[in-house]
Amino acid sequence: MLTTIANRSVIVTGASKGIGKGIARVFASKGARVLIASRDLAQADAVGAEIRSAGGIASGLAADVSSPEDCARMARAAVERHGGIDIVCCNAGVFPAARLGAMSVADWDQVLDINLKGTFLTVDACLPALTARGRGRVIVTSSITGPITGYPGWSHYAASKAGQLGFVRTAAIELAPHNITVNAVLPGNILTEGVEALGPEYIARMTSAIPQRRLGSVEDVAYAALFLASDEAAFISGQTIVVDGGQVLPESHMALEDL
Ligand code: NAP
């Protein structure tokens, strides 16, 4: 049993749906006070209302993580609503596909601005409140795509997700004297509303690439993040946890066919 995170103030970016919503719900179910950030206020508010109706403490906020002003406002809101910031989950991300040759500079910039620069801007804005606490946690949602694997159409996305790990490792060193750990979770294929909308054929094809023969749930990722947020994980920093049901392990498709 891990030490409780009850009453800790948590920001989860990109928490209006998908993995971020899962993190917000799991953290709130453990008593944390959660600020749910996304560009769409109505969706963020809806998640806040859902958590409150289940007895949790949460509220929504409209913030674009690629905007320094929005990130500053997000950090201020967490301090005003919850008295400070203990845990920051940099989870907001986009993954539009574009192959090289068809990818525009605008495509590249959009993905890098949100996924990579957004991670820096979120941490940067929260830093004064995190350091004031004398302890803290930063948990970045990276991906297996980029740090470990590749996939056609996602060179910009893969670069952003690998870039996040470079950020994590150096930020972990810089923030260590403040008792702040910085780690990343690397999800494989997770069954979010967006993935579900791609249909049963897509899901069946992805499932066939995973040794556990299922896609991950948002809770699978959230519980890895919860561990990294716990007091028990205090001596772990600059590290990654892959949450993929063994997807990166087979050395070829034959290894899966031979199962
Ligand atoms: P999702 O269901 O599409 O949710 C993305 C969330 O990010 C939404 O709440 C979205 O809300 C928010 N968002 C997007 N751009 C934003 C911005 N500029 N500022 C603030 N919020 C923003 O995606 P997901 O699958 O849960 O992915 C979440 C994270 O996990 C991403 O970093 C993704 O790269 C990573 N990941 C996902 C998978 C997977 O299988 N699903 C696998 C590996 C890694 P708004 O659009 O309203 O802003």
Image (cartoon, helix red, strand yellow):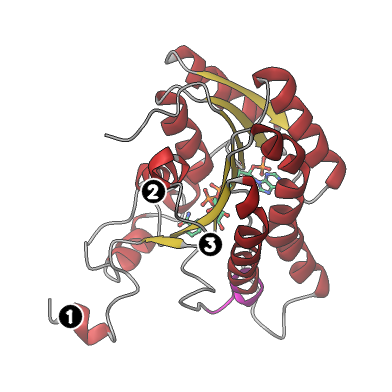
* Quadrant for the C terminus in the image: bottom left
Numbered disc in front, either 3 or 2? 3
Measure the alpha-carbon separation of dots 3 and 2.
15 Å
Magenta region: which residues? 152-158
Give the residue type at disc 2.
Answer: Ala
Magenta includes 202? no
248 vs 20, left or right, is left
Q: In which quadrant of the rendered image does the N terminus lie?
A: top left
**Residue holding disc 1:** 257
Which residue is found at the position 62% from the left and 31% from the top? 36
Q: Nearer the viewer, residue 181 or 28?
A: 181
**Residue 60 at x, y percent in the picture:** 65, 26
**Farthest residue in the right direction?**
69
Dot 1, how many residues are within 10 Å of its Cα: few (below 14), some (14-19), or many (20+)? Answer: few
Quote the CA–CA distance across marks 3 and 1.
35 Å
Tell me which amino acid carries mark 1.
Answer: Glu
Sequence-first tag of 1 and 2? 2
Q: Which mark is residue 238?
A: 3
Looking at marks 3 and 1 on the same chain, the residue that comes earlier in the sequence is marked by: 3
Asked if residue 134 shows in the view, the reply is yes
Of circles 3 and 1, the one toward us is 3
Q: Which numbered disc flags the more N-terminal residue, 3 or 2?
A: 2
Above/below status of 81 relative to 5: above
Pinpoint residue 238: horizontal percent, then vertical percent: 53, 62
Give the SS element for disc 2.
helix
* Amino acid bearing label 3: Gly
Give the labeled residue for mark 2: 224
User: Whole-percent x and y of residue 81?
Assistant: 69, 18
For image coordinates 64% across by 46% down, the residue present is: 178
